[in-house]
Every structure is written in C-alpha cells, then in structure tokens.
Amino acid sequence: MKRDGPFSSPCLRKGTTLQIRKIAFIGTGIMGARIAGHILDAGYDLTVYNRTKEKAEDLLARGAHWADSPAQAAADADLVFTMVGYPTDVEDVYLSTDGLIRAAKKGAWLVDLTTSSPQLARDIHDAAEVEDKHAFDCPVTGGEQGAVDGTLTLIIGATEEQVAPVLPVLESFSARRFYFDQPGGGQTAKLCNQVSLASCMMGYADALALAQQSGIDAARVLEVMASGTGGSGASKTLAPKSLEGDFKPGFLAEHLRKDIGLALQRSEELDITLPGAETAFTLFDMLCQIGGSRMGTQALTLLYQEEETCRAAGLDWSLLEQEDEGDGCGCGHDHGGDHECCGGHGHEHGDHECHCHH
C-alpha cells in the first residue's frame, strides 16, 4: 500500500526529534530491488548501491539516487538497509575500514536483511553501539513473490520497543514481524526456517520422483499432498515450478546452500546433529557443483532426472567428477587453508569434510 509520504507518520527516535527522511539501500538483487521499490513507493528519499549498477536501473528510473559505494550511500542516511549475498559480504560492508559502522552518521539505524551469521549480527550490533549508531539483524522470508507484493515476514533480532522508531519503514514492505529480542536472534530463527524449508523441499522432490517413476500423475499427487498432511509451503509454491521445468531463481540454490551451512555451523557449536540439514546440504552442494548454483532452489528435482534432462537444463555431471579430483568442497569460493564453505563456516573435518558427502 502506497503512503502519502514518510512525514505523514514521522519516525521519531525516543528522546530526539530525528525523523527518518533519507534511506540508503545496499544490495538491489532479486529481493533487494523489490524491497527498495516499496520504500520508494512509501515516499522516502532513497539512495541505492549495488555492485552491478544495471540491477538498480529500474529504481534509478523511479527516482532513487545512485551512490558509488556503500559508504557514500550511507553518509547522509538516517536509515541504512543491506541485503547482500554472504556473511563475508556483510562483514565487509559493515566492519571494513570504510564500512557502514564508520561511514554512517551518528544516530543512524543500520538494518541487515541478509540471512547471515548470528555471531556476526551480534558483533555488528555491538560495534554500532560503540559508535552511537543502532544496528539489528532482520532477515526476511516470503520469497520473491512476498517481496513483489510487499508482504514479507521479518524476523528481527531486537525487541518491538527497540524497533519502533523505524517500524513505519519496515511496514512498507512486510505483512508480519516477529521479534526475537536479542542481537543475532533474528538470524538464528531464520536459520531454523531454512532448515525446515530444505527438508520440505527434499520431501516433495522424493515424492515427485516416486510418482514419476511409478507412472502416475505427479501433479495429482501434489493435489493429494495439499489436501492432507503431506504438503508444505514448498510443495505448494515450488513443486509446480519443478514439474513445469521452470528453474528461474526466486531464491538462488547457492544461497540456500549457504543458509544450511550456517545452520550446520551453529549445530556444531551446540554439539547437536541435524541429519535432515546434513542431507540437504549434500544435495544442494551437488546441485551447485554441477552448474545449478544460480538456478532457483526448485532445481533440486533435477538431481532425480536422467542425465539428458539435466544437460538440457544446463547441468553437467562431469563437473562433479572434476571437483572430486580437486581440493576443498567445490563451493566455488577461495577457502585457502581454512576449508571454509558456504557462508564462512569452518568445520571439524573428520569423515565429513565440509558436509560434502559425494
């Protein structure tokens, strides 16, 4: 819903007269561009930055300003949003020498929408407070369609009272907000969601493979699942795309692999085992290795198909053999000697190096 403008419901920080007038948005990819568009529609003065300027062109045509760096975007902003790819990107954007912690003005709000590391979220919050700035983690769920519709669910690592000063802006692109009351709490809750999502996706992929190989109508099987307890949000929204051969990304496979990796890192810290997440990581890592990293997560079902079908979709199983012959886990990142994989998590390697069970 479009507002008349930000000043119809001024966003005031307790004890001050600061209004949220200028907003910076860093990271205008699949999700970020849609979210930033809703902020523009709400009437705010918006400055954007993205590593690939072309991905911000639509926003610029609609009245957003361009900045040549995150620091430049944040310099005069009352509120800064970030939505980048990996925890290493988040760390660089916030904590580098010219990062947001130093570049943003005193009193500014810094809100990270990326799914990232809970510990990194805590570090950013603490560093911001030292500089008289205010940072909280706010990963989102709801997929590309939720971003398009402005109905995302926000998972917030702060209290409702703490977030109140920027709530009108958050409301411009979300329908529901959950508060987890502590720095990093939003990230932890989001990882729980991603673990469940990945297992649901494996469930529908298994079900479709069983139906197809048995020679029965897979689409009708999805209807059965939807009418009973076998369905899920994933089977409702993503499984039909899998059946149609539509693997365009609403959420990148490599990003879900990253999220599951972060959850596995946390499980190791807690000394617990997540068998479903382990299996999901194996499958999504395999998909990424054979050329599916930039496909939508629904491309998982291609792993169940004949090689000819995979090849037609752009996958190459020979790449997996090449990775097996090399070093590391095949994530496509430079791990150096640390063997960090998919989100910057290090592991006790033993028999399950990098959770890549080929």
Image (cartoon, rainbow, N blue to C red):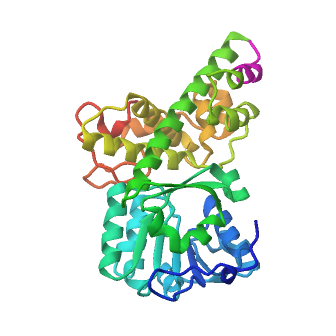
Query: Which residues, given as a range, are shown in magenta?
Result: 216-224
Name the foreground residue: 293 vs 16.
16
Q: Residue at x 36, y 61 (%)?
A: 183
The x and y percentages for residue 235 are: 65, 31
Relative height, residue 208 to residue 7 (above, below): above
Q: How many marks?
A: 0
Is residue 333 something that shows in the picture? no
Q: Quadrant of residue 234?
A: top right
**Residue 217 sits inside the magenta stretch:** yes
Q: Could you tell me residue 21's position as x and y percent?
A: 60, 85
- For the point 67% across and 37% down, the residue is 238
Residue 10 in picture, x, y percent from top left: 61, 81
Residue 215 x %, y %: 73, 11
Q: In what quadrant of the picture does the C terminus appear?
A: top left
Q: Give above or below for 137 relative to 216.
A: below
Q: Is residue 309 above or below residue 254?
A: above
- Front-lying residue, 95 or 39: 39
Picture layout, residue 296 above or below residue 140 = above
Residue 230 lies in quadrant: top right
Task: Return the residue found at the far top.
Answer: 214
Is 45 on the left-hand or right-hand side of 75? right
Q: Quadrant of residue 273?
A: top left
